[in-house]
Image (cartoon, helix red, strand yellow):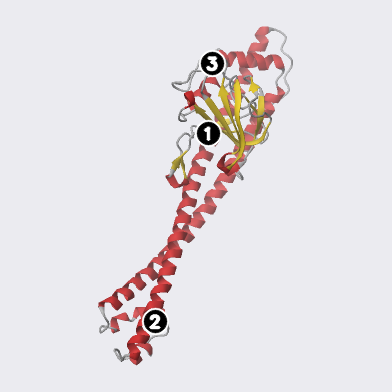
Amino acid sequence: MIAALGAFLPTSRPAAATLEEKEAEARRVQQELDALKQQSEELAKEYSILSSELESLRYSIAENRKRLEKAKAEYEQAKKTLGTRLRSMYMLGEVNMSEVLLESTSMDDLLNRFDYLRYISNQDLDIFKRAKALRAEIAMRQRELEDQETRQQQKIAFIQQKQAELEASLKAQQALLDSLNAEIMQLLYQMAANSGSGGGPVNITINGPFIFPVKGAYAYWDTWHAPRDGGRRLHQGCDVMAPMGTPLVACVNGTITIVAEGGNAGKYIRLTMEGSSTFFYYMHMQDITVSQGQKVRAGDLVGHVGDTGNARGGAPHLHFEVHPDGGAAVNPYPLLKRYER
């Protein structure tokens, strides 16, 4: 996959002299960008799916480890209780211990021979049965944990491969963008603006212009409501993948109402739209170039793409959220698709 990206790397272009030539050149560049973007979006989709699967697997491993430790603790307690009970029975002469103890090499072996102890009480028998069940559960969970950890390592390797391919594709996009002269870039933006909206219905009122929040090469997929924490919560935004340090810009005119760092979000800001209570979250930022209370215009630099918070170690990206009229988050994917360049 990475080797195939060489076909998309930019080549030097002679300056277009006339408007018709510029438009033809812009269309050719647009086709190259579209091919790269489609490739990047497919990789972003695969990366997102693999990441969700890995997150679920890690949750399952953690839960399995908890149950394994609990079973081990209960098993040790059961063995201790049985040892105490057998000593008591021996002291009271309730059982011919020589028959049992001479045949048994360990407490585990004794559990295998509990059928010899037909004369013990039902309560003692229940303890023996519980101990045997716990021992079987421990063996089962240990085998399952080994299998899970093997699958986890395989999935991590797949994710690292997809991340490398995605980063290569995004770099190829950025190289192409960097190679364009200002006139061709302006024509591309005009062509995108005149191409009509897409991405499904967007029930969000935008006051003034809306600018795509990532200024550079990017790829994204509809990650709205992807499971997190083993399904205990759902993803509340859209992840836009981009190379580390890619500029992030204000998507609308408004005010920076929160600048903070901490928790899963890492470094993040909240941008409240001018003349409205609608606000947008930018999370996992590498750095923040605005301050709380600052007025910004659509397109102003607010920071750079990073991997802070719980994105550490994964592909750098912007977690983008939209809250219409100050309410609950809604899926930002259609909005981003409508206004992407």
Provide the residue designation for mark 3: 207
Q: Distance between the residues labelled 3 and 2?
A: 76 Å
Provide the residue designation for mark 1: 42
Q: Residue 206 carries which label?
A: none
Is residue 251 visible in the rendered image? The answer is yes
Label 2 environment density (alpha carbons within 10 Å; few <14, some 14–19, many ≥20): few
Asked if 258 appears above or below 57 in the picture, the reply is: above
Residue type indicated by callout 3: Asn
- Dividing the image into 4 quarters, which one contains the C terminus? top right
Report whether 320 appears left or right of 105: right
Q: Which residue is drawn at 33% across and 81% down?
A: 113
Residue type indicated by callout 2: Gly
Which of 203 and 2 lies nearest the eye of the viewer?
A: 203
Q: Residue 83 carries which label?
A: 2
Q: How far apart are marks 1 and 3 (CA)?
A: 32 Å
Which of 291 and 149 lies nearest the eye of the viewer?
A: 291
Asked if 242 appears above or below 56 in the picture, the reply is: above
In percent of width and height, residue 10 lies at 69, 26
Asked if 332 appears above or below 207 in the picture, the reply is: below
Between circles 2 and 1, the one closer to the viewer is: 2
SS at mark 1 in the image: helix
Which image quadrant is residue 121 in? Answer: bottom left
SS at mark 3 in the image: loop
Which of 15 and 163 lies nearest the eye of the viewer?
A: 163
Which image quadrant is residue 180 in? Answer: top right
Sequence-first disc among 2 and 1: 1
Asked if 61 appears above or below 309 in the picture, the reply is: below
